[in-house]
Image: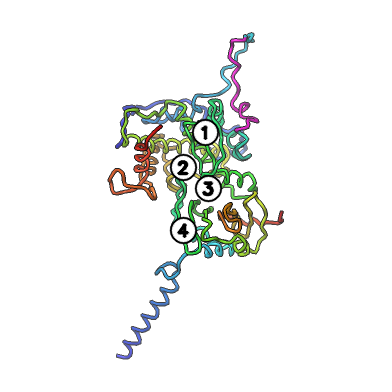
Amino acid sequence: MMIYLKTIVAICMASLLAACATPQGRGDVRPNFEGIVKDVAGAHPDAIQRTMAALGYDGVIVPHQLGPSANFADANIFDIGGLPDKGVWMSLRASPCVSIVETKRAFDSEWRKLTADTDQTTNDAYYVMITVSSEEPSCLRRFEFWRAKGQKVTSSL
Amino acid sequence: MEVQSGLNSYLRVSSTSDMVSPNTTDLPPVVVTAPSTVSGSYSGVYITFMGGGGGSGPGPVDDHEQPIGPEDPPPPVDSKTFLDGHPQFEKLTQQMQAWVLQSEKATNQFADFLKSGGQIVLADRGAYSARYDPNSNTIILDKGTMERLVAGVGGHPQAEGLMFFAFAHELGHAVLAATSAYPFNPYGNEIDWAEFRSKNEALSNANAMLIANELQAADPSIQIPFSGYGGDQALRPLWNAFLIDHDFDSLINAMSDMVSNYPWPGGVDLNGDGFINQIDRYIEEFRAPRP
């Protein structure tokens, strides 16, 4: 009887641990924008696929209309687009504000000015562009990254 | 739902697309050009796309010099010469300009578009997005994307390829609007309109595929992903099948189905088929009051 109980407890514990370890399996790990940025900044090799999965995006672009939306606790995302295994982009509403400063700080690499409202950086895995919100200049408007194939930013403008 | 045009005849199409690139080497690359012979109801549109929507070539050479009178029309201008330095052409990125000039079809189509008074407008549309407005004869390209591409030297090459594909798709719309290659029946109902719009999207996508294929056949290193209602992985096999069977209708019908069935987020099931998709979007478009 004792052996049965121990076995049952062991099975329950194993199931519980498996549930906790599965990233999105039981809904206990909710996707968030911060996680996307961490993946990209950390040059995670599967950041594109993981981002698409987190956003629930199927990788299909529909001409003449904005891409789909996704509401996270830390970001209100719309106009999602991208090419599987190549790159992803997304626009963010000003509320909740995703801090430009915090987003930049997540990356070790240097940022350079690309256009009046867009900065760019590159790490070992990705070419990244962030655009400032015209409504709230301290907030992020767009986040876009493409597989960079080892390009590095060497200078800051 | 399928429109029967009664034109299911096989047509022979002449074009210059079978010419092999002059840039030959000792070991020429495998070049797969678009077929010069296609079958099906949409062969007429194919001819139009291949010919550049009316053909703006330099015309036949006349060895006999003739005086030009005040009533005579100006001599025809070669499409490339016409585009060179044109302020509308220069609204494209350097890379997109180069791709236009490398494609005979894109060169002729864009020159025809500009000669008809067409304009390029950069405006906020959503990333990598574009649109053709037949009322103002304008191709609208997303301003932010274009600005980033102009400045984004070193960005992923497929990013610019993606925007070029969107531009070539809009060129297809412009060609269709400027010609009678695929007109809408003015007595058609909303279902006919949905069919027409889905086919129009598919045809415009086919135009972008033709142009991308022309470029990639000449230079396999050029990366222009196919996109629109399906990813490259879904569209490329359809295109490859077309290169083999030359059945333009199959390509168009397959892509048109992808368009029709693609979800319309936030829309309403207007045709009551239990799905909210692009068909409903087009029906709403048809029902909307017109000026």
Q: Residue at x 34, y 43 (%)?
A: B280
* Above or below A32: residue A115: above
Is mark 4 in CB contact (under 8 Å) with mark 2? no
Tag 3 subunit: B
Q: Which residue is mark 2?
A: A64
Foreground residue, B277 or B254? B277
Tag 2 subunit: A
Q: Is residue A121 left or right of residue A90?
A: right
**Residue A139 location in percent, x, y?**
58, 58
The amino acid pointed to by label 2 is His
* Above or below B198: residue A3: below
The amino acid pointed to by label 1 is Thr
**Residue B47 location in percent, x, y?**
45, 27
Residues at marks 4 and 2 on the same chain: yes
Q: Residue at x 31, y 47 (%)?
A: B269
The amino acid pointed to by label 4 is Leu
Q: Is residue B233 left or right of residue B148?
A: left
Q: Residue at x 46, y 52 (%)?
A: A59
Q: Which residues are magenta?
A: B70-88
Q: Which residue is mark 4?
A: A55
Residues at marks 4 and 1 on the same chain: no
| C-alpha span from label 1 to label 2 | 14 Å
* Above or below A107: residue B260: above
Q: Report if residue B212 lies within the magenta region.
A: no
Tag 1 subunit: B
Instruction: Decide whether the magenta segment is chiefly helix, strand or loop.
Output: loop
| Label 4: which secondary element | helix
Q: Which residue is mark 3?
A: B127
